[in-house]
Image (tube, rainbow, N blue to C red):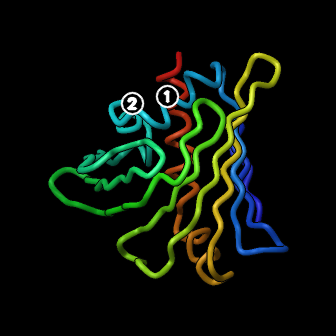
Amino acid sequence: MTTKTRETTIEGLADRPAVRIVRDFAATPDLVFRAWTDHDLAARWLGPKDLDMRIHTWDARTGGSYHYTMWRGAEQVAEFYGSFHEVRTPSRLVQTFTYLGMPDDVSLEINTFEAIDGLTRVTSLSLYETYEARDAMLSSGMEIGVVEGYAALDELLR
């Protein structure tokens, strides 16, 4: 399955249980990486535009962790947590990602930040234990949060 919306490409890989997301941003790798790792900035763009992010833990360093919830008004609609395994400013971020609603389906996310022609290309590779877990994520509507979040990140980077 491949979805291409605006400048964002989201694809389920055929040869392994993984999702690859590719997006270019009009900013330097330093700025884009900072928006990914600074909790105040991440809270302003991560996820669908109709949800508010509340960060409970955010220690974006190698060996650190994060925990946040997503809210629509007074209702909590999702909860996520994970560990930062490698934080290599401004080129690479490796972390686990767990949705509390599916705690057995932890993914490993490898994000790279590459300068290309005055832009920063972010490539995110999310690895799952099974194809079923990967397909569940793809069918969850996650592309809405990714595309809307990236549009908010574009605004933030301006």
For disc 2, the neighbor class at 10 Å (few under 14, some 14 to 19, many from 20) is: some
**Most distant residue in the front direction:** 63
Residue 49 vertical placement versus 94 (above, below): above
Question: Does residue 6 appear in this view?
Answer: no
Q: Position of residue 62 (x, y in %)?
A: 48, 46
Does 53 sit left or right of 37 as displayed? left
Q: Amino acid at mark 2?
A: Leu
Q: Position of residue 103 (x, y in %)?
A: 41, 77
Dots 1, 2 in contact, CB < 8 A: yes
Question: Does residue 28 appear in this view?
Answer: yes
The residue indicated by pointer 2 is 41
The residue indicated by pointer 1 is 34
Front-most of residues 53 and 59? 59
> What residue lies at 33% left-to-right and 48% top-to-bottom?
51
> What residue lies at 55% left-to-right and 22% top-to-bottom?
31
Does 139 sit left or right of 34 as displayed? right
**Most distant residue in the left direction:** 74
